[in-house]
Amino acid sequence: MREWILAEVTYGYVKDHPYEVAVLPLGATEPHNLHLPYGTDTFEADIIGSRVCEAAYRQGARVVMLPPLPYGTQSNQMAFPLAMNLNPSTLGLVIRDLVDSLAQHRIHKLLILNSHGGNDLKPILRELYGRTPVHI
């Protein structure tokens, strides 16, 4: 069990070891030419997030990595088979709901680790600024 990976810990562990910071790996599901898998962006965010969280955790940070979000905005790649799209408004709503969940659980710091250039987060970040106690 890696204590900094939410998907690997139990309720008992979380109950006894509260976190202060969350990391959300944000990827996409899209083709990357003929040589890379559809999950490339998500894999990048997941691996980098895991390593960053491990380093911070080992230095005493109470950090947890949330499960990666494997979908992003693909509105310009829908001609490619199985490019999976979340419209920008939908992606914003998902992020807003996750931020609200974190606030309810008293986690007031969130790092969004975005590895997909099509995920334009500025509008939702502007909307959330001042409306949530979570620092993003």
Image (cartoon, rainbow, N blue to C red):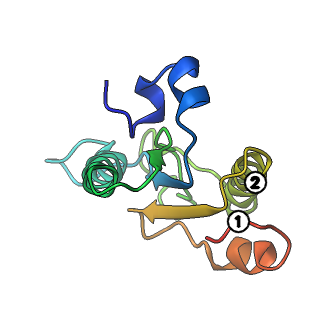
Kind of residue at disc 1? Val
Upstream in the sequence, badge 1 or badge 2?
2
Q: Nearer the viewer, residue 42 or 21?
A: 21
What's the CA distance linking mark 1 and mark 2?
Answer: 6 Å
* Residue 87 in view of the camera: yes
- The residue at 71%/61% (across/down) is 92
The quarter of the rendered structure image containing the N terminus is top left
Q: Which residue is mark 2?
A: 103
The quarter of the rendered structure image containing the C terminus is bottom right
Q: Which residue is mark 1?
A: 134
Q: Which residue is outermost to the right?
A: 131
Q: Nearer the viewer, residue 77 or 107?
A: 107
As displayed, is residue 43 above or below residue 123? above
- The residue at 45%/24% (across/down) is 9
Rendering coords of residue 55 (x, y %):
25, 55
Kind of residue at disc 2? Ala
Rendering coords of residue 88 (x, y %):
68, 63
Q: Tell me whether the residue at label 1 lies in contact with that at label 2, contact meaning CB atoms closer than 8 angstroms.
A: yes
